[in-house]
Image (cartoon, grey):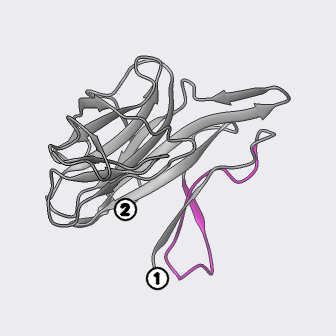
């Protein structure tokens, strides 16, 4: 009966339904549990497979104007709750500073506490980060060629914690926790 919905809000204007919403009654009623601003929505929410109270939510500041796309800013970031969304705090340790774009996180089902995230920033166009403590601290692993705005998913292998798949024009595979990548079909 508990569901979470990440709401991006309208692309062409401020306001609207932006933020993270939660229902405890199968959708009959909803509460906004994470709100950043009228310019920043929540693009992704993931739940720790070993603890349903641990949530990570990606805030993405974006806005389209004629001939312009604002894709990232100081309000973009990764937020964590350890109490089912009652309280939130922004994660920073090991993540890029300054303005960031979209962040796409994914918990590994193969190792408790392991999280991968694809992050756009001014420091690196798109880089893969990893955390071994459910998002508390992060380590930059490698650049990836999969812009999160268009290729949003990353898929950790369900049995091998070091293997992950990053779809793009050509799917990339890592067998060493995101430190190196090869194209799908290439051998190690």
Q: Position of residue 132 (x, y in %)?
A: 16, 44
The structure residue drawn at horizontal position 43% and vertical position 47%, both measured from the top left corner, is: 170
Q: Position of residue 12 (x, y in %)?
A: 80, 40
- Within 10 Å of disc 1 (Cα), the crowding (few <14, some 14-19, many 20+) is few
Q: Secondary structure at mark 1?
A: loop
Which image quadrant: the C terminus?
A: top left
Residue 135 is one of the magenta-drawn residues: no
- Within 10 Å of disc 2 (Cα), the crowding (few <14, some 14-19, many 20+) is some
Residue 126 to residue 47: above or below: above
Residue 74: name its quadrant.
top right
Q: Position of residue 63 (x, y in %)?
A: 72, 34
Residue 84: name its quadrant.
bottom left
Q: Are marks 1 and 2 in contact (CB under 8 Å)?
A: no
The residue that mark 1 highlights is 1
The residue that mark 2 highlights is 84
| Residue 134 is at least partly visible in this image | no
The structure residue drawn at horizontal position 27% and vertical position 30%, both measured from the top left corner, is: 142
Residue 24 is one of the magenta-drawn residues: yes
| Residue 112 is at least partly visible in this image | yes
Query: Could you tell whether 87 is left or right of 173 in the image?
Result: right
Figure label count: 2
The structure residue drawn at horizontal position 47% and vertical position 44%, both measured from the top left corner, is: 58
Judge by depth and name the residue closer to the eye, 111 or 41: 111
Q: Which residues are magenta?
A: 15-33
Lower position in the chain sequence, tag 1 or tag 2: 1
Q: Position of residue 83 (x, y in %)?
A: 32, 58
């Amino acid at each position: 009966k508990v569901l979470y919905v990440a709401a991006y809000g309208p692309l062409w204007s401020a306001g609207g339904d932006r933020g993270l919403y939660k229902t405890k009654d199968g959708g009959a009623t909803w509460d906004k549990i994470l709100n950043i601003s009228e310019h920043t929505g929540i693009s992704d929410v993931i739940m720790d497979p070993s603890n349903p109270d641990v949530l990570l939510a990606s805030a993405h500041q974006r806005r389209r104007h004629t001939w312009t796309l604002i894709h990232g800013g100081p309000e973009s970031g990764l937020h964590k709750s350890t109490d089912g969304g009652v309280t939130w705090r922004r994660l920073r340790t090991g993540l890029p500073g300054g303005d960031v774009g979209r962040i796409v996180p994914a918990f590994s089902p193969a190792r408790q506490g392991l999280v991968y995230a694809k992050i756009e920033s001014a420091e690196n166009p798109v880089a893969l980060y990893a955390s071994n403590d459910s998002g508390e601290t992060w380590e930059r692993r490698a650049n990836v060629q999969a812009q999160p705005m268009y290729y949003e998913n990353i898929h950790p292998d369900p049995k091998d914690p070091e293997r992950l798949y990053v779809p793009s024009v050509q799917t990339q595979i890592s067998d060493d926790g995101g430190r190196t990548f090869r194209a799908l079909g290439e051998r190690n």
